Image (cartoon, helix red, strand yellow):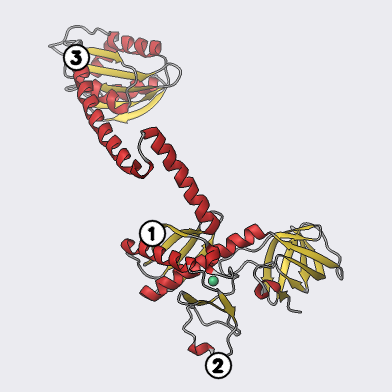
Amino acid sequence: MATRRLYYEDGQQTAFTATVLSCTPTGTGYEVILDRTAFYPEGGGQACDLGTLGTAQVLDVQEKEEQVVHLCDCALEPGALVDGCVQWQRRFDLMQQHTGEHILSGLIFKKYGYQNSGFHVGKDVMEVDFDGPIPSEDLWALEEEANALIWQNLPVHCYYPAREELPHIPYRTKRALPWPVRIVEIPGGDICACCGIHVAFTGQVGLIKILSCVALRGGVRLELVCGQRAYRYMAHIFGQNREISRLLSAKMPETAAAVQSLQTHCSEEKYRAGALQKKVFEYVAAGYAGQSLALHFEEGLNSGGVRDLAQAIGQYAAVSVVCSGSDDAVYSICIYSEHTDVSVFGKQAIQSLNGRGGGKKEAVQGTVHATRGQIVRFFEDAAQSVHGLQEVSILGKNHRKQQIK
Ligand SMILES: [Zn+2]
């Protein structure tokens, strides 16, 4: 026996009484079939209703042929009368999204002739796909037009036209549909074949906001929110803007300009800091003039800074080693030379200091898990070992015997 679908008779009905026709245990609960129901089963991109049937929680609702199957967390007695209660908040939210989607899809169909090729109401946002491109400059006009239709508070008319009437109705559809076809019409807005449930008047959608538009398979995917979701989303963004306004001491409508000026200021400062750092590096490097192997520790440098300083010192010392970091974490290290191939020595050094890295003949870079003391000892030993010296070739003619600072 086909379930009587109360949700099609009245989309606002949340309480009803029905007779339990069957109750079948499954691995995940009990599948309950009633003679009538106000629970909308998942379908047409719209999630199912949730709520209670007597003392049982309704966990899922699916359509199986002509029947609506309620997955419940406990058994119900076949033949018994049971009171059903649909969670209104969830139902209303889903209806707001679905009707809002129809309004926008109807406008897009009218303007470009595009069909809606995908529709999904997610937990936070709704995704709607269209089978053609929409120029980004058109999006906000479409959004404005959709909101204007919402505020006209037009009736949302759901009906089953007679078979002979149907060919004369210019409704949107993706494919040929089995009889009977249910039509959802918003006068001046949209006419579409649809099995979903909708608010009674467009005003109940409240607000529609497009969040994004990305190219997808020759068309686009829009992310949007309607109704309470749109309000919550906008309230969240408003809160963010208020905080930015407070942090930047800028008026709320002027935060973007304030961020832009902060960005300009930051890049100028970054440039200035870079120039100053170069001077400091030059000053530090000159202190190593004439040395064979210079080992230098500097605080607070990233890997780029470590390399730049090693390069600067490498203009004065035959081989330079720069480390930045701490005994508690790791040291970023760079072994550099202008004229000597440090590729083998550098990699061996990093390996011996329990680190990882790599490089080419003029520079080897990486991170080491060693203490400052261990690093100093390693390079002292390397500098004093004849074998090590040959390997790194730091006994150049123009250099004094190795010294390590
Ligand atoms: Zn629909």
Quadrant for residue 40, please give it.
Answer: bottom right
Q: CA distance from mark 2 to mark 3?
A: 92 Å
Check contact, mark 2 vs mark 1: CB within 8 A: no
Residue labelled with disc 2: 164
Q: Which quadrant, please, contains the C terminus?
A: top left
Q: Disc 2 marks which amino acid?
A: Glu
Judged by depth in the image, the label closer to the viewer, 3 or 1, is 1
First reached walking from the N terminus: tag 3 or tag 1: 1
Check contact, mark 2 vs mark 3: CB within 8 A: no
Q: Nearer the viewer, residue 381 or 300?
A: 300
Q: Disc 1 marks which amino acid?
A: Val
- Give the vertical position of 238 relative to 122 (above or below): above
Quadrant for residue 196, please give it.
Answer: bottom right
Residue 132 at x, y percent in the picture? 37, 70
First reached walking from the N terminus: tag 2 or tag 1: 2
Ligand 1 sits in quadrant: bottom right
Residue 184 at x, y percent in the picture? 55, 76
Residue labelled with disc 1: 214
Q: Secondary structure at mark 3?
A: helix
Is the CB atom of the residue marked by disc 2 within 8 angstroms of ligand 1's nearest atom? Answer: no
Q: CA distance from mark 3 to mark 1?
A: 52 Å
Is the CB atom of the residue marked by disc 1 within 8 angstroms of ligand 1's nearest atom? Answer: no
Q: Secondary structure at mark 1?
A: strand
Pointer 2 local density, CA inside 10 Å: few below 14, some 14–19, many at least 20: few
First reached walking from the N terminus: tag 2 or tag 3: 2
Q: Nearer the viewer, residue 250 or 162?
A: 250
Residue 113 at x, y percent in the picture? 38, 76
Residue farthest toward the left in the current orientation of the protein: 398
- Give the vertical position of 126 relative to 162 (above or below): above
Residue labelled with disc 3: 283
